[in-house]
């Protein structure tokens, strides 16, 4: 049982052992009791020699309790994993790999991998979420100031393009989606938007600026309200979107300072997960542990650490 509204002291005492964490993972994975993935038999027993394993009482198939979770194949003790999740969930500004490494007393590369996996779990929870109602939409370009402004190139040429969409009800921000896009062509935007705005039924209202590439959004069956806006007008007419982008930039700058271009989506997933659950407060820890248990294992290839590609926030 995950403790809600618990202080760090109470939480860490509850999950200070491998056994306590395994029991928590077991209960999330099989809330109605163990079920063998091979024969569907509903009875199994833990092995004293391999505490993370359950053996089916019928076909004797052995199933790892941490298989198909982000904890799969990790040699880090589960108590440290739970502590990491608690720290991530309870630090409003996010925690970077260096600070997590210091708190867990692990190597920075280990802390980096742990954070990346937790962010994958966060992204997984919002993967199938779609937006509805009144939606503000625009592209943002992340990557700090351009060093080549004087060369006559676009100020966005070395930035990462991100499609930003946020629900806006009576000027109050709702759910947020931020997706890295390979370019800002009309077809790319159409494809990305069609995945994230509910089309059953269609007819939602998209508000955006009057760039020609946004005309293509009308083919998706929604009402597209395009308005010519200065940067100042954008801040008031699309206040929720401006707020989200401003907070995201601040979050990246304050937390990560430098981040890997290849993993920007991973950072955006964390930001959106926090934004979309900002009302949960203390319950975020239990939601995040559940997300980590229910997310499939993340391969080492995806997690490859490439600090040389980092860019300023
Ligand atoms: Zn079985």
Image (spheres, grey):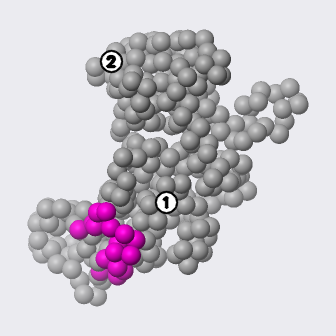
Residue lying at 35% horizontally and 72% vertically, measured from the top left: 11
- The quarter of the picture where residue 255 lies is bottom right
Whether residue 212 is visible, yes or no, is: no
Query: Within 10 Å of the Cα at label 2, are there few (<14), some (14-19), or many (20+) other Cα atoms?
Result: some
63 vs 16: above or below: above
Mark 2 beta carbon near ligand 1 (under 8 Å): no
**Does residue 18 belong to the magenta stretch?**
yes
Give the extent of the magenta segment.
Answer: 1-19
Q: According to the image, label 2 marks what residue?
A: 202
Instruction: Mark yes or no: residue 223 visible.
Output: yes
Q: In this view, does 6 lie to the left or right of 183?
A: left
Q: Position of residue 231 (x, y in %)?
A: 65, 22
Q: Which residue is drawn at 39% across and 24% down?
A: 170
| Tag 1 and tag 2, C-beta contact below 8 Å | no
**Residue 196 picture location, percent across and down:** 41, 30
Residue 250, above or below 198: below
Query: Mark 2 falls on what kind of element?
Result: loop
In percent of width and height, residue 129 lies at: 36, 37
Disc assigned to residue 91: 1
Q: Does the residue tagged 1 have its C-beta within 8 Å of any atom of ligand 1?
A: no
Q: Return the mark for residue 194.
A: none
**Marks 1/2: CA distance?**
38 Å
Q: Work out whether 211 lies above or below 238.
A: above
Q: Position of residue 309 (x, y in %)?
A: 71, 52
Label 1 or label 2, whichever lies nearer to me, is 1
Q: Residue at x 44, y 48 (%)?
A: 274
Across the whole image, how many numbered discs are drawn on residues? Answer: 2
Q: Residues within 10 Å of mark 1 (few under 14, many from 20)?
A: few
Q: In which quarter of the image is the N terminus?
A: bottom left
What is the secondary structure assignment of the residue under circle 1?
loop
- Residue 134 image-quadrant placement: top left
């Amino acid at each position: 049982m995950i403790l809600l509204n618990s202080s760090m002291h109470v939480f860490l005492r509850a999950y200070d052992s491998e056994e306590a964490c395994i029991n928590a993972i077991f209960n999330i994975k099989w809330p109605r009791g163990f079920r063998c993935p091979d024969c569907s038999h509903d009875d199994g027993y833990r092995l004293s020699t391999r505490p993370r394993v359950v053996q089916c009482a019928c076909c004797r198939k052995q199933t790892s309790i941490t298989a198909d979770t982000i904890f799969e194949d990790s040699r880090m003790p589960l108590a440290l994993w739970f502590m990491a999740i608690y720290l991530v969930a309870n630090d409003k500004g996010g925690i970077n790999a260096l600070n997590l490494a210091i708190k867990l007393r692990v190597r920075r590369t280990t802390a980096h991998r742990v954070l990346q996996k937790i962010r994958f779990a966060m992204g997984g929870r919002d993967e199938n979420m779609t937006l509805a109602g009144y939606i503000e939409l625009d592209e943002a370009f992340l990557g700090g100031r351009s060093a080549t402004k004087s060369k006559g190139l676009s100020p966005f040429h070395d930035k990462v393009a991100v499609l930003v969409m946020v629900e806006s009800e009576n000027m109050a921000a709702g759910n947020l989606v931020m997706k890295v896009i390979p370019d800002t062509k009309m077809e790319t935007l159409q494809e990305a938007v069609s995945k994230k705005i509910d089309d059953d039924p269609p007819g939602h209202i998209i508000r955006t600026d009057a760039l020609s590439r946004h005309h293509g959004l009308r083919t998706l069956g929604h009402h597209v309200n395009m308005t010519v806006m200065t940067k100042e007008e954008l801040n008031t007419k699309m206040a929720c979107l401006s707020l989200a982008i401003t907070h995201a930039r601040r979050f990246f700058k304050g937390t990560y300072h430098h981040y890997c271009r290849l993993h920007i989506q991973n950072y955006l997933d964390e930001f959106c997960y926090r934004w979309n659950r900002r009302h949960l407060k203390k319950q975020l820890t239990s939601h995040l542990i559940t997300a980590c248990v229910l997310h499939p294992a993340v391969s080492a290839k995806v997690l490859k650490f490439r600090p040389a590609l980092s860019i300023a926030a």
